[in-house]
Image: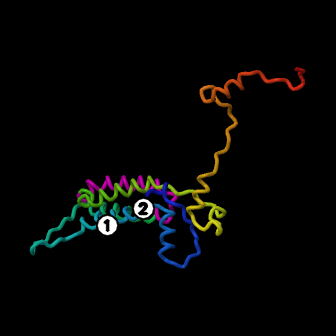
Amino acid sequence: MSSATAQAWPEHDGGINLRLRFRNWRRTRPFWGGLLAMIAGLPILYFPYAKLNLSGMTVSMATTAGAGSLIIGVLMICLGLTAWFQPLVRIFCGVATTLLALISIPVSNLGGFGFGLILGLMAGGLLMAWAPLKPVAAADLSADEGTVEAATAEYAAEAPAETTQPLLPAQQTPAEAADSAAPAADPQEPR
């Protein structure tokens, strides 16, 4: 399900259920893109400073670009949080996350051994692709209709506004074409 096909939920539903309130909050922002951006920053941060112990042998993967890895990882985490709390800057966050993930290839052990790179590229794509839903009017959610589905069906069944442009001859039926080709009769002219 994408944000274009999901049902719109009001921001403040007045419910007491914490799970429903979190779901409503999550649906109004690029939640998954921000979460993946924050998770992508962790391996980029961790591996240059890690000291792994393999069978009694200590393996250090420290590089000279440890500070660069620190900056890239912290920035990706900050971009994920920014996308959560300021959804209007989601395009900037998506582009910056994608660029930082690509920069992490030479700087941070192949982008955190590929984990941070892949997650960062997916996060950037999700952040750039997310779009907010159109809000549902309060009149559409009246209590006598009862459900969001009824309001959505009513909204979809509304007829589009008529156009004021005349139809082209190819768009008219033969009867309409004959009527439009006949000269208009003057109402004051005697027959």
In the rendering, at what x and y percent does residue 158 appear?
63, 51
The answer to which quarter of the image holds residue 78 is bottom left
According to the image, label 2 marks what residue? 79
On screen, 37 above or below 16? above
Q: Which residue: 61% across, 55% down?
A: 155
In the drawing, what numbered circle is on residue 3?
A: none
The number of discs equals 2
In the rendering, at what x and y percent does residue 116 appear?
30, 60
Q: Amino acid at mark 1?
A: Leu
Q: Which residue: 59% across, 61% down?
A: 150
Q: What secondary structure is found at the residue carrying circle 2?
A: helix
The answer to which quarter of the image holds residue 180 is top right
In the image: residue 138, left or right of residue 33:
right
Seen as rendered, the residue at the extreme front is: 191
**Which one is in front, 118 or 145?**
145
The span picked out in magenta is: 83-109
Where, quadrant-wise, is the N terminus in this rendering?
A: bottom left
In the rendering, at what x and y percent does residue 118 appear?
30, 56
Sequence-first tag of 1 and 2: 1
Q: Which residue: 19% across, 71% down?
A: 51
Q: Main secondary structure of the magenta part?
A: helix
The answer to which quarter of the image holds residue 69 is bottom left
Is there a contact, CB below 8 Å, between mark 1 and mark 2? no
In the rendering, at what x and y percent does residue 117 appear?
29, 57
According to the image, label 1 marks what residue? 42
